[in-house]
Image: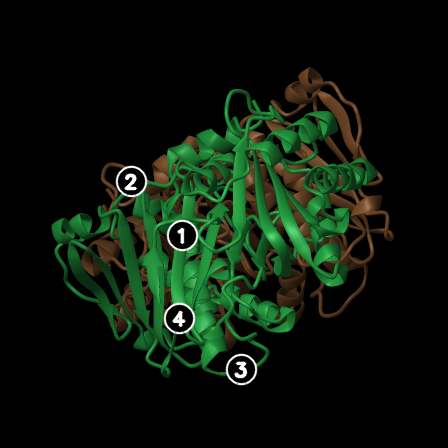
Chain colours: A brown, B green
Amino acid sequence: MKQIDGGVTAAKGFEAAGAEAAVKYQNRKDMALIYSTSPCRVAGTFTSNVVKAAPVKWDQNVVARSPFAQAVVVNSGIANACTGQAGMDCCRAEAEHAGRVLGIPAEAVLVASTGVIGMAMPVERLCMGIDKLAAARAHTREAALAAAQAIMTTDTVSKEIAVEMQIGGQTVTIGGMCKGSGMIHPNMCTMLAFLTTDANISKEMLQRAVSSAVVDSFNMISVDGDTSTNDTLLVLANGQAGNKEICDEGADYDAFCQALDFITVYLARKMAGDGEGATCLFEAKVIGADNRENARILAKSVICSSLSKAAIYGHDCNFGRFLCALGYSGVSFDPDRVDLWFQSQEGKAVVYTQGSPVAYSEEEATRILSAPEVTVVADMHMGDAQATAWGCDLSYDYVKINADYRS
Amino acid sequence: MKQIDGGVTAAKGFEAAGAEAAVKYQNRKDMALIYSTSPCRVAGTFTSNVVKAAPVKWDQNVVARSPFAQAVVVNSGIANACTGQAGMDCCRAEAEHAGRVLGIPAEAVLVASTGVIGMAMPVERLCMGIDKLAAARAHTREAALAAAQAIMTTDTVSKEIAVEMQIGGQTVTIGGMCKGSGMIHPNMCTMLAFLTTDANISKEMLQRAVSSAVVDSFNMISVDGDTSTNDTLLVLANGQAGNKEICDEGADYDAFCQALDFITVYLARKMAGDGEGATCLFEAKVIGADNRENARILAKSVICSSLSKAAIYGHDCNFGRFLCALGYSGVSFDPDRVDLWFQSQEGKAVVYTQGSPVAYSEEEATRILSAPEVTVVADMHMGDAQATAWGCDLSYDYVKINADYRS
């Protein structure tokens, strides 16, 4: 497996586009299209929030019932959540219009939205946007980038990746893009992420691979603890790589999963590091836990702690806050056996061993905590299980962005 | 029952003091004493955090095992948490020293600390502080205020209250003080709160009343979602009111509980409204829930949402964030039946009914959301249960306070 340049158009047969539709934002791309030249198997994971956006309900239906999918239409600016029946009608109108323009069934069109919740959708402008997208779509690097840029809201950078691997003598490619960057606390799902692959894989194995991949990637990140109404991860597989269909577990499935895990962790880290107002990627690694699930809970508790996040922002080695967050995670452990240290490209500072503080240089700790990626490691001394979670620091800009977001 | 002026010295036989001991802060009161002229029954609730501060462990032992308690020694500045064996030794030294000076057993002395976690305690300065406190203790209004001021950390105002009621023909008084204001997300307990009463009540009934009172008061507030290592609520009852001992349920117990509930809700609201960086008290009221526990979970989910808190700070009627927070609370409900409105001293703005947005004046909503106390009400239309939770907005100053806290 190797990483290559590219995004959602890296795999064979996939086209993309980004366009200006003035859904809410002016003078910037705010609609994206992903299109496959042949029908795709599709798998997805969606928000666990009881309040689900209309596009989530539409897509869940398509993934469960449609024989195939072939296009995804995405807009930023308005989330089409808490919009009642009008929101569902909008999804149908988008899918039917895209189906007509692209010459595919409406039931093969997935839709996704991100932005302000509770605002009405401008259906006409969306349809005009779809016309532009269909005309502009292309199997090029630039088209993938345009799509990745169009789905951004408060994101400061677009997020793309592509990898290729050999499966059964054929080169198989997976590409993807995603967006954050607030209301990020995915639960069995993610914010908006779209993966495309030319792998030939059964729908069942595709879903199994995706559901497995999110557990240690998108489900291990948090920007602000708020699980969105719109979280959606979709994977389209058109089979154009020509490999023998992956229908069960084995070397081919493992190779595909390895690449998928690499991509989902890469995109999840990008999302965390570009959290609203973030000045750094804040990684929590728990080792020596008694089991994997407890390791995950402990790691996630630390990256969700407002006080730990504020300490990272202040480059302040206030290690008690990190121990405190482990302590209220809900996982049982012996505080008197815990070791804790901070590490980054600047070095490593051990601050706590076997339940007691140890002497360390504040100056050195501050330097370590000032790096663009900071990791805190907790060794629970209970077993061999480990897990990693990713978040970001809590800055003035998080507040600024979210006190003013709608205006 | 009526509210009266006063704090922890309002009840008969209770003395208090505040003193400067330079534990960490300079030139301000940082140690407090509560002392009863006769032995007290004592009840308490403590943090559920696995990482418990040394004073929490000391007090849990006193509450469980000592025949009576007679004094509480509190310091601000350093939390005596994550301090290993040295922290436990410090608690014992404090209790033994206070016992000698006050002429009571060390096992009758409760201790509490609040401040930075992981820093070593200056035992000698604490003992010198205890000498000052013992000399200054008095049964006066001023002494109660001095104690309430001494336990403040990032609090901007001291928090006290007192009420009196008639029980069995006798006037019974309860007084209390508490402090916030960061790392506030109590769980079966609270931050630091101390209540004193001259009620004659059995230890068992006192503990029952306290455990019941915290459920809808301190356990329903959050400033930042971080459950502290030090949360402690202690109630001392010296029986000097002379009422017939409350040994079981009935009118006397009910009168006592009513007063206790009033006091704990009052102090909890004060704590939430004075959260770190807060510009307003943010109240979430859930009505029409299917049961009480679900109502509590829903209300608490809303006041814990960073995005909802930031919207309150921005006076922004971004109602979708509040619905989103209900949705990820873990409670099951039908989003299509929910009504939502905002209210304050400025009026009421209905923004969502039966699962769809309704037209409202943004100008009026902004005015309502600019009040010093803002309430969001969600009617789930599932039953008759309701609950209220209290938090505060998320401001630049929360980040400022917590990025710089140790320096």
| Residue shown at 18% from the left, 66% from the top | B358
Q: Which residue is mark 4?
A: B166
Q: Identify the residue shown where x is 45% and y is 81%.
A: B251
Q: Nearer the viewer, residue A321 or B145?
A: B145
Question: Do labels 2 and 1 touch, CB within 8 Å?
Answer: no
Q: CA distance from mark 1 to mark 4?
A: 17 Å
Say which quarter of the image contains residue B313: top left
Residue B286's spot in the image, x, y percent? 36, 69
Say which element carries label 3. loop
For badge 4, the amino acid type reads Gln
Marks 3 and 4, how far apart at CA: 16 Å
> Identity of the amino acid at label 3?
Glu
Q: According to the image, label 3 marks what residue?
A: B249
Badge 3 sits on which subunit?
B
- The CA distance from mark 2 to mark 4 is 51 Å
Q: Amino acid at mark 2?
A: Asp
Q: Is residue B373 above or below residue B329?
A: above
Pointers 2 and 4 within a single chain: no
Of badges 1 and 4, nearer the viewer stands: 4
Residue at the spot of label 2:
A404
Amino acid type of disc 1? Ile
Q: CA distance from mark 2 to mark 1?
A: 37 Å
